[in-house]
Image (tube, rainbow, N blue to C red):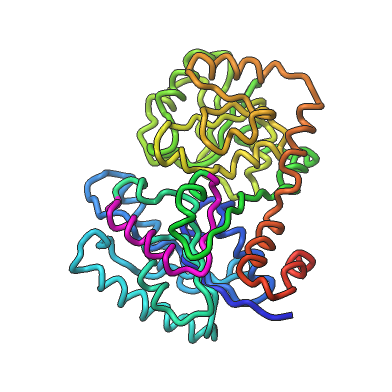
Amino acid sequence: MPEIDVICFGGEDWWYHNRGHFDMQIMRRFARNGKVLYVNSIVMQKLKIGRGKGFVQKVVRKARSIFKGLRKSDAGFWVYSPFSLPVHHIRGLRKINEVLLRLQLGRIRRMLQINNPIVWVACPAACEVAIKMKRDKLVYQRTDRYEEFPNVDADIIIRYDRRLKAVAELTVFANEFLYQKESDQCRKAVFIDHGVDYEMFATAENDKEIPTDIKDVQRPIVGFFGGIDNHTCDIELLNDIAEQLPEMNFVLVGKHSVDCEALFSKKNVRMLGQKPYKQIPHYGKCFDVAIMPWRQNRWIKACNPIKLKEYLALGKPVVSTPFQELQKYTDVVYEAKTREEFVNLIKKAVSEKDDELVTKRKKKVAGASWDSKAELVLRELLPDERFAPAIICNG
C-alpha cells in the first residue's frame, strides 16, 4: 500500500476552532496512510488595532498557538502554527511573509522528513508559498468565499484564488453553486459535498449523560451550535425570535465575534461558549429544535454548513433561512423565508411528535461519512492507485 504525505494549509486553527471543518476531517483520514502536517491558518485579515477585548483575545490566542510549536494531535497528524504578519494587503511587504513561511516550513519538513508531499491549500493566503513548494501534487479547497471574509483585501484574495485554481492539479468544491460557477477556471475540478461524523452524532442520545450547563435549562430548547459571526449570523433575527418566543429557551453553543449584549441580556437566552468538538453532539441532543439564522449575503449564498448534516444526524427538526445548498434538504428541513415564518416554523417544529421524521432525517445523511469523502478525494487525485478503500478499513 503506497503512503501519502500531505502538507495542509488549513483554513482554521486546530487548537482553537471547531474540528468539524472539511480540511481537518480529510486530514484525519489521510493521516492513516502517511505523514500529515496541518499548518494552522495563516494571518489573512488586516491588522486593526483598538477593537477592545476581542482584539486582545485574538492576539493572545494566536500567540499561544504559535508558541505551542510542532505537536502531534490526537487526530494522528502534526500541527504547526507559523509566525506570519498581517500584511497581505500591502504590496511591498507580502514577500516578507513568503520568506518567513518558507524558512519555518522548510525546517519543519526536514524534521518530519516530508520530501515530496501532496500540498493541500484551504487558506488562500498560503498561495505563493504553496505553489513554489516542492511537491507531488497541489490541491486547492474552495469551500468558502474568503474574499467576502471581514477585514481582508478582497482583490488580493481573489487573485490568490484565481492563481490556485489555475495551478492546482485538483480544486475541490464543497458547494455546488460555486462549482458550477467556477469550475471552468480550474485545471481539474470536483464537487464533493461535506461529510458528517454520523455515528458520533446519531448515537449521542444513547448516552444518558447531559452536560451540566444545559441540564437545568427548561424545555423547549431552541438550539444553535457554531460560531456567531457578523458575516454569517443574523443577530437581529435572533433577537426578534427570542423576543417573540418568551416561552422557549434559546441555547447558543459556540464563541461569538460580534456584539451580542442585547441578545444575551434576554432571560430566555443562554450563551454557553465554545465546547470541545466531541461534546457538541451531547449539547445538540438536548435541543428540541435546531436553527440556522443566516444572513442573506454572498458568503451564505456559497456556503454549505456542516452543522446542517450534524443536526440531521441527531434527528432534530431544523429551521433555517434560505441558502442554495438547503434546497437538497427541504424534505427534512423547515425553510423560513421571513421572520414571521421563522417564528411559526419553530412553533411547528417544537410540536412535532413523529418518530418517522426523526428516522428520515438521520437516513438523509447516513451515507455522508467523512471516510467516504476522503475516498472520493483520493479517487480524483490518484486515479491509478487502489489504496483508497484501505483508508476506510484502517479507521
User: Outermost residue, front direction?
Assistant: 184
Q: Give the magenta part as a residue range.
A: 152-176
On the question of residue 74 being in view, the answer is: no
Q: Is residue 304 magenta?
A: no
Location of residue 211 by image quarter: top right
Where's residue 95, x and y in %?
A: 25, 73
Provide residue 167's location: percent of width, then percent of height.
Answer: 43, 69
> At 70% across and 49% down in the image, what residue appears?
368
Q: Position of residue 212 (x, y in %)?
A: 64, 37
Residue reaching furthest to the left: 92
Q: Is residue 93 visible?
A: yes
For the residue pair 260 and 353, the one nearer the viewer reads as: 353
Residue visible at 63% across and 63% down in the picture: 377
Q: Main secondary structure of the magenta part?
A: helix
Marker count (numbered):
0
Q: Quadrant of the C terminus?
A: bottom right
